[in-house]
Image (spheres, rainbow, N blue to C red):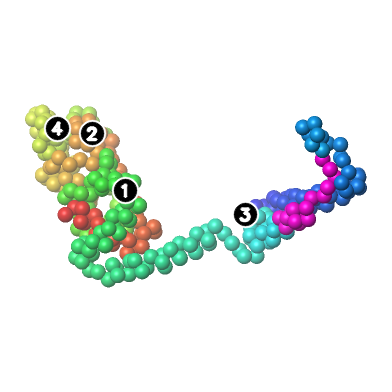
Amino acid sequence: MMSTGWNWFVIIVTLANILACWWLIVWATKNKANESKEGDVTGHVWDEDLQELNNPLPRWWLYLFYFTIIFGLGYLALYPGLGNFKGLLSWTGVSQYNEEAREVHEAQKALFAPLAKLSTEELIKNEQALLTGSRLFAANCAACHGSDARGARGFPNLTDDDWLYAGDYDSLVTTITYGRTGVMPAWQSALNDDGVQEVTAFVRQLSGQQADPQLAAKGEARYNMYCVACHGPGGEGNPAMGAPNLANNIWLYGGSEAAIAHSISVGRMGNMPAQKDFLTEERIRLIAAYVSSLAK
């Protein structure tokens, strides 16, 4: 929204330019006619023998210039363009987008209506539902989880049976709808460098990797003090909190000694954004069904 001064400045300059175009056309046509008679040579010569004659513009061409001026004034009367004036139609880009989006949603109801009536079990087995879900996944989820849903560093693989917040259909619907926020706090200040090294050794031992047994033994005591509340005594994790399973060899940020030490000392923060403002309930159900079919 412009201030009053800028509002009138834009209005005056815009209208003055349009009127100046009209005046220029009128002046140019009248001035040309007064200099010499129609058909006389003006004295302008190109390519030695190509002379300009004093012939007026064709009427249709001249009228076309006037039409553009009238069109411009009509456009500025109907649509925003003159400062804060909204136009007689009150058009905005947002209103047009919302109208087009509404039309698209109405047109797609015919596609989603039959699938919306299916139960969860029927939806997961329905070929049309899975095909539509795969397309919705590619458009909305593949940027993070990959086109094959196998994820990447920091983005979970959705094709295995390892889940941070459980992988059943209802949990997937909740995750997609409301999103998830996972926080692994930093333990550097509490453990110091030696403690981080010891817990790292114990975690590597939990996942079946080689580690210094003496460091792992010391790390177990520290693990039971700081980590067991979230990850469990055996490192099995806790889906209710989104705490990952540390007893397998599936890692979200890598299972190397350096990666584990970084997670312990600096912490991690993961965010799955909520999709409820972008996807309808029908679309979320289809994506959840598709992801369920991948996991199985």
Between the residue at mark 1 and the residue at mark 4, the CA separation in whole angstroms equals 34 Å
Q: Is residue 116 above or below residue 239?
A: below
Q: Are marks 1 and 2 in contact (CB under 8 Å)?
A: no
Q: Secondary structure at mark 1?
A: helix
Mark sitting earlier along the chain (3/1): 3
Residue 263 x, y percent position in the rendering: 24, 37
Count of number-bearing discs: 4
Between the residue at mark 3 and the residue at mark 4, the CA separation in whole angstroms equals 61 Å
Q: Which residue is mark 4?
A: 201
Q: Secondary structure at mark 2?
A: helix
Q: Nearer the viewer, mark 1 or mark 4?
A: 1
Q: Which residue is mark 3?
A: 1
Residue at the (30%, 43%) spot, across then down: 269
Residue 108 x, y percent position in the rendering: 38, 65
Inspect the image, locate mark 1, and give the three-letter code of the amino acid beneath it. Answer: Ala
Q: Nearer the viewer, mark 3 or mark 1?
A: 1
Inspect the image, locate mark 3, and give the three-letter code of the amino acid beneath it. Answer: Met
Q: Which residue is mark 2?
A: 259
Mark sitting earlier along the chain (1/2): 1
Q: Residues within 10 Å of mark 2 (few under 14, many from 20)?
A: some
| Residue 34 as seen in the image, left or right of residue 276 | right
| Residue 249 as seen in the image, left or right of residue 49 | left
Between the residue at mark 2 and the residue at mark 3, the CA separation in whole angstroms equals 50 Å
Q: Residues within 10 Å of mark 4 (few under 14, many from 20)?
A: many
Residue 39 x, y percent position in the rendering: 87, 46
Which residues are drawn in magenta?
52-68
